[in-house]
Every structure is written in structure tokens, then in C-alpha cells.
Amino acid sequence: MTILIKNIKKLIQVEESPRKWVAGADMASLNTIDNAYLLIENGAIKDFGTMDNAPKAAGGVQIIDAKGKMVFPSFCDSHTHLVYAGSREIEYVDKIRGLSYEEIAKRGGGILNSAKLLHNTSEDELYKQSLQRVNEIISLGTGAVEIKSGYGLTVEDELKMLRVIRRLRETTPITIKSTFLGAHAVPAEYIGKQDEYVDLIINEMIPVVASEDLADYIDVFCDKGFFTVEQTERMLMAGIKYGLRGKIHANELAFSGGIQVGVKYGALSVDHLEFTGDDEIQALLNSDTMPTLLPGAAFFLGMEYPPARKMIEAGLPIALSSDYNPGSSPSGDMKFVMSLGCVIMRLVPEEAINATTINSAYAMGISNTHGSIARGKVANVFITKPISNYEFMPYAYTTNLIDTVILNGEVWK
């Protein structure tokens, strides 16, 4: 299929020479073209430019007139847990009443609660619930998403989650990366013998996940009350042995050492980072690890936000992602994530757009094919409703501004 989008008011995040990410002061710059066209062919971006140079449409070409509208590359959401069963709104009320994330977890809530719900949910029902969430985020402009396991915490239930993720990848047009997160929490039966659960992950879970090719990455929750640096190192090394690169939950609850261990073992990203100081920033500089901030979780939990401005001013890139999950960030709306980045963490709109497109694409290992408007990249874009300028996207933080979604070069309905 060939699609020609013409009369685009502004074409956003254009690249003549694709970059792997945008860092430091460069994050405040955004390449755009006014009065533009975008040509899509065979699922990829074929060409773009000003309307003065637009090609004449031949027969069989679908024409979309985007007069007054803008075209963005689809959001890339590099950190989600959207395969889960049920919901946890009762814990939401507990949070309102003053209980902390750790206190709820100690009472058997949190991740362990989701694990119980998932265990009692069939694979087909889990797929059905998760498919609704995938369709929701597509409608909100997300064209690529990373999905983690981690609500199983047993061999069979972790495999159940990963099989559902694979089924979503096979049956939906969105680009999906899968991450094995057996080390999301310590199951109740392993309290007091945490190293035995780490052994289970290393000796049983990782080998079968790898043998069935169910995951692209491995993740560990390296933080206060979860897994130590030493345990994280063991699991990362086991993952690397089986070809699974790391993506670490780090420093959400304390200065845990999670950032440093992620960098040491070449993690693709370290995520959360509410507790990030000079030592952590220094560790990230000159590494290939993307700092990924999840403002939806800090917003929902009432926590301190990561020091985004300090990180950018130090020369780092940052990515923003939704952390879509039932307990601490029950939303996959990346437009709202941009708004939180701007309003709370003081990013300018250009930084927020870079953080939710090209940088978040890098954080899930697909910046060579996604995250910007570049020739040869996958044609995952969305067309806005008529808007005044791109700053209006994070400004109008609850308004649905997306008119048309195109995934893999086809209009999604």
C-alpha cells in the first residue's frame, strides 16, 4: 500500500541522518518541516519534504489531506507491565489513606496481589484483557511498546505472561518487545530465603524462557526491599549467557546501586531513577545505557520526581515512558506522560517529544527503525487534529488530539 499525506501543517521529528538518541542541550532542538508531505510505501517511510516538491499521486495511492494538522512519529513506550489480570483500585484507596508502596507490599498487596490474580486467570482471558489495553494505547498514539512479565513469579505463570505477550505481537500491528521480569518481587513462600528464588530464576526460568525465545530482554527490580546489587549481578550474568540484555528497575525507592550495576553490565536502560545523584549521573555519562524516567508512577504514588533537568544539563539523554501497570501507573497515555515531563519535571516540549520518540525507541532497542521520520524507517505515525503548534500537545494534557493512526504503513481503525 502507498499513502501520500499532503498539506501537513508541520512534520515533526524529521531526520535526514538517523541518530541513535538525542542528549543534553540537543534535546531542546526538534527538526520539523512546515507545509510538508509524507510518502509511505510498503510499510516504510519512502520520502518527505515540502509541498513544493511533493510527488504527483498515481493511481492506487491513498491520499490523506492533513491541512491544519501535524504528523508525529508514533510514541515508543519502552517500559510497561500491561499484561496483567484485574485491577488494584483498593490499594489506590490505601494509598490515599497514607500507606506507602512498601507498606502495601508487606501486607501481601502490590505485585504479590497481581500475581495471585494472574495465577487464577486463564491464558485466553489474560490475552483478552491485555488486547483491550494494547488497542487503547494504539488509539492514544503509541506505535511501539515494551511489555514485561513479572506478575507470575513461578515458572509456569511467568511463561503464561510471556506467551500472551508473544500472542499480542503476532495478532496486533503495534511493534512489541518482550522482557522477562521474574525478579519483580520475592514470592511469599520465599520470604527469608530470597537467594533460593534467585536460584530458581537463574537455573529454571531463564533457560526455558530463552529456549522458547519468549523474551528480548531481562529485567531485575534492584531496589530497597526487592533485590540486592549482588543478586542483580547474578541474574544479569545469567541473562547475558542466554543472549538477554538487561533493562533494570533502579533507584525508585532508594539509592540502591541499581544504576551503577545496570551500567556495569551494559543494560539497555535503567528505569525509574527517582533517587539519582552525582555518582549515578557520572556512571551514566559515556555509557550506552538510557536513563528512563516514569513520571506516571511518581505522580500516582505521590513520590519525588527524578531530577530530569539536572540529568539533561549534565549532558545525558533521557527517555520518558508510561510504566503502564495496575498498581503504580494505571495509564498508558504517552501524551499525558509528556505533560507530566513538562509541568512537573520542567522539560520544554521539544525535550519531552525527543524523550517519548527517538530516545524511548533507543531504550527498547529499535531506534534504527522507529522513533523519527526518516527514510526507510517503519511507517508508524499519527496525524493530529487541527492544532496551533506542537507545544499544544503537552499543554492540552487531557484532550484527545489524535485524528489518524498509521502503523506499518496502514491506517489503523
Image (spheres, rainbow, N blue to C red):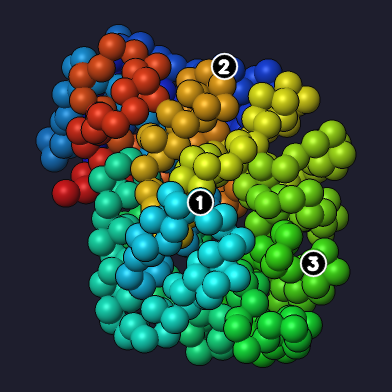
Residue 262 is left or right of residue 102, and the answer is right
Q: Position of residue 398 (x, y in %)?
A: 29, 31
Of badges 2 and 1, the one in the foreground is 1
Residue at the spot of label 3: 228
Marks 2/1: CA distance? Answer: 41 Å
Dot 2 amino acid type = Ser
Residue density around tag 1, few if under 14, some if 14–19, many if 20 or more, within 10 Å: few
The answer to whether residue 341 is above or below residue 88 is above
Q: Dot 3 lies on which element?
A: loop
Q: Position of residue 152 (x, y in %)?
A: 51, 79
Dot 1 amino acid type = Gly
Viewer-proximal residue, 178 or 46?
Answer: 178
Q: Residue placed at 30% from the left, 49% from the top?
A: 138
Disc sitting over residue 98 in the figure: 1
Q: Residue placed at 65% from the left, 57% from the top?
A: 249
Residue density around tag 2, few if under 14, some if 14–19, many if 20 or more, within 10 Å: some
Asked if labels 1 and 2 touch by Cβ distance under 8 angstroms, the answer is no
Of badges 2 and 3, the one in the foreground is 3
Residue at the spot of label 2: 29
Q: Earlier in the sequence, mark 2 or mark 1?
A: 2
Q: Earlier in the sequence, mark 1 or mark 3?
A: 1
Residue 366 is left or right of residue 387, and the answer is right
Q: Dot 2 lies on which element?
A: loop
Q: Residue placed at 39% from the left, 25% from the top?
A: 394
The answer to whether residue 324 is above or below residue 180 is above
Dot 3 amino acid type = Thr
Instruction: Tell me if I can see residue 58 in this picture.
Output: no
Q: Position of residue 214 (x, y in %)?
A: 53, 76
Q: Dot 1 lies on which element?
A: loop
